[in-house]
Image: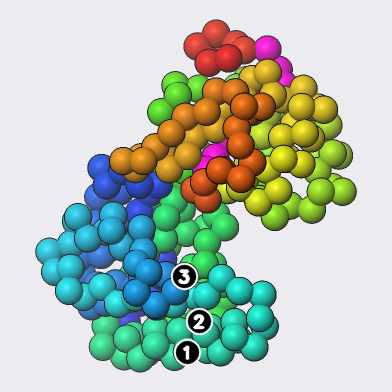
Amino acid sequence: MTGIFYGVGVGPGDPELMTLKARRVLNQAAVVVAPESAPGRGSLAADIARVHLDDPGKIAPLTFPMTYDRDALDAAWQANLDAVLTHLESGDVAFVTLGDPMLYSTCVHLMRHLRSRDVRIETVPGVPAFCAAAARLNRAVAGENETVAIIPAAYRQPRLAALLAAVDNVVVMKPSRGYAALAGALGEHGFLENAVMVSNCGHATERIHGDLRAVDPGAVEYLSIILASKVLASKGRAA
């Protein structure tokens, strides 16, 4: 195999938050692979990368369908793996992903398949959305000796109560799925009084919700982040 496979984090949305290293790697790569959920739907990660590319024409979209159909998923993954391996025969391949490649990213799964093919892999970290949201609010994710948990939207509800009881602060990723139950659990464990949700952080459509009780569960956008704390606000930290 000729090329190196790079997993490249492009940040949460603001093109200025993409790192200098990411820009260099994307421009030196022969192909920039951009995941999309359906053919022709486009990729937010590709939109961010395109701002920094000298040759936007080398972006190659690959479809990773959002479905529970195992046969469809297996077929798509195999086709995408074959496409990446073909691109690697010509040179370096950069796979762009929102936020950081090592945090809830499609890139992680692709890397697992590529390792078995003895492909050289390198990762370029990016700014995670929850860090960008915290910076947007001038709010600490955690301070001093406080604990913090990062919870994905699909986290199993029976385990959620035990987790919320054990930590001081939480970051909830993409809470649109099961929002009503999630908000209820946050309220039961004393998190709602010091909670905020940022939707589409760094994008033109960014919205900040300071009262999670007033949010319509059916209107929660996919790219949303909740930062919540059950400890008292400390100096220099937003309540």
Amino acid type shown at disc 1: Ala
Front tag of 3 and 1: 3
- Magenta-span inclusion, residue 226: yes
Image spot of residue 188 (x, y percent): 82, 27
Name the residue beneath numbered marker 3: 37
Mark 3–mark 1 distance (CA, rounded to whole Å):
14 Å
Amino acid type shown at disc 2: Leu
Q: Is residue 31 above or below residue 145?
A: below
Q: Quadrant of residue 36?
A: bottom left
From the viewer's perspective, is 206 left or right of 108? Answer: left
- Does residue 142 appear in the picture of this structure? no
Name the residue beneath numbered marker 1: 79
Q: Residues within 10 Å of mark 3 (few under 14, many from 20)?
A: some
- Which mark, residue 114? 2
Which sits earlier in the primary sequence, circle 3 or circle 1? 3
- Which mark, residue 230? none
- Magenta-span inclusion, residue 146: no
Quarter the N terminus occupies: bottom left
Q: Residues within 10 Å of mark 1 (few under 14, many from 20)?
A: some
Give the residue drawn at x 42%, y 55%. 98
Q: Mark 2: which secondary structure?
A: helix
Which sits earlier in the primary sequence, circle 2 or circle 1? 1
Image spot of residue 43 (x, y percent): 36, 64
Q: Is residue 177 above or below residue 227?
A: below
Q: Are marks 2 and 1 in contact (CB under 8 Å)?
A: no
Q: Mark 1: which secondary structure?
A: helix
Front tag of 2 and 1: 1
Q: Which residues are magenta?
A: 224-232
Q: Mark 3: which secondary structure?
A: loop
Q: Is residue 84 above or below residue 206?
A: below
Amino acid type shown at disc 3: Ser
